[in-house]
Amino acid sequence: MVRAAGFLAMSLVFGLVAADAGDLWVHSRCTQLEITSNGPFAVMPDGTLLTVTSEGLRASADDGKTWSAAQPICPGLKGSEPSAYRLVRTRDGTLVLVFLDFTQFKFSWDDERGEPRDDCRLEVWAIRSTDGGKTWTDKQRLLDGYNANFFGFIETSSGRLVVTLEHLMRDPGRWVACSFWSDDAGQSWQRSNFIDLGGHGHHDGATEPTVAELRDGQLLMFIRTNLDRFWQAVSTDGGRYWRIIGPSPIDASSSPGQLLRLQSGRLVLVWNRLDPEGRRYPRSRPGPASEVACSWHREELSIAYSDDGRTWSKPVVIARQPGGQLSYPYVFERRPGELWIIAGFAFRKSWKERFSLRLKLNEQDLVRLDGKP
């Protein structure tokens, strides 16, 4: 989550003591991707891969090994922040970008009051292109005030665009989640109701939502919380309203996940579980970040699948960095069944020891929908 200019080590922000760093472990079914971008990606009709950086839109004809010069989009993009923007190419060929605008970015929090100050600002905007990224129009603000990373932007089977966002509220200071939807390929947008789970703190509440469409057309949102699991919300009307809200069956630390509907119709989820395999992760103390003690475990990335969004396969760890962090995942289906899984944050023990974790996995390799190990 975007909190301040430059990232603070978790041990400083949340009072945790990091374990000794160990060697990176990657599941034998995963292979390293030979790409030079963390996404987001979109695919053109001829198979050309598109991505967005701080400088603009880039294209690749060799599966992301090399990229073209950037075609400018607009000011305010920040490529070093994972999941600060998401790109969709609609079925009619329109490119739509939803992004955090860093031109006036300032994180300003009053620890004594537990409230954002008046100058706390990071707005969400949208912009679109109907000519393959040569020109961009219809730039508009979706949310003012302060917002942060988001993990859901999809085109539904009806052609509706739905993006799930988080927004920082006051009195008490905490995060709420919502969606915006567009039926005209991003020319205009409307907001859903806010999902408010309570909480008090600059990392508390309903944060960093991700979304996927179920086989029956309903939308499923998973929401990061400090309550030991994702909470979920279901929309029966394409993201206009979220009226079915409650805890999900997925245990999770205070860290976001990526939910994606695959071309097979199956759902995939990549995330940080509540605890590492075989041990309990230390809980943080209540404080400015959260009013409740919670797990900030981010040493392992796990994967699970579902056919219906209600029951899930047994989680499988796909990568582990003891004493460090693998988090803020991005999942992209490059070809049917070919999953690209990228850690937005990957470091061995401190933020200064960052590296790239970009993996390729076949959908069928780790499916365990029968619950067997």
Image (tube, rainbow, N blue to C red):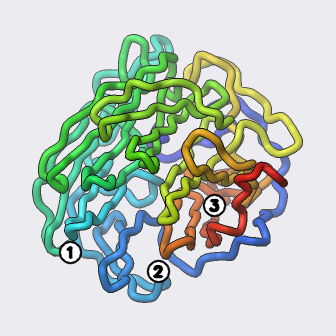
Q: Distance of mark 3 from mark 1, alpha carbons?
A: 33 Å
Camera-near label (2 vs 3) is 2
Q: Residue at (23%, 47%) from the top-left corner?
A: 125
* Residue 349 seen: no
Which residue type carries mark 3?
Arg
Q: Are marks 2 and 3 in contact (CB under 8 Å)?
A: no
Which residue type carries mark 1?
Gly
Q: Distance of mark 2 from mark 3, alpha carbons?
A: 21 Å
Residue 356 locus on image (x, y percent): 61, 67
Outermost residue toward the right in this view: 278
Q: Could you classify mark 2 by the number of other residues whose Cα lies within 10 Å: few (under 14), some (14-19), or many (20 or more)?
A: many
In the figure, is residue 128 to the left or right of 2?
left
Q: In the image shown, does 313 or 151 lie closer to the viewer?
A: 313
Quadrant of res 364: bottom right
The residue labelled by disc 1 is 132
Say what secondary structure mark 1 lies in: loop
Quadrant of res 70: bottom left
Which residue type carries mark 2?
Gly
Camera-near label (2 vs 1) is 1
Outermost residue toward the bottom in this view: 62
Whichever of labels 3 and 1 marks the residue nearer the N terminus, that label is 1
Q: Are marks 3 and 1 in contact (CB under 8 Å)?
A: no
Whichever of labels 2 and 1 marks the residue nearer the N terminus, that label is 2
The residue labelled by disc 3 is 354
Q: Could you classify mark 1 by the number of other residues whose Cα lies within 10 Å: few (under 14), some (14-19), or many (20 or more)?
A: some
Residue 166 locus on image (x, y percent): 39, 34
Camera-near label (3 vs 1) is 1
The residue labelled by disc 2 is 64
195 above or below 351? Answer: above
Whichever of labels 2 and 3 marks the residue nearer the N terminus, that label is 2
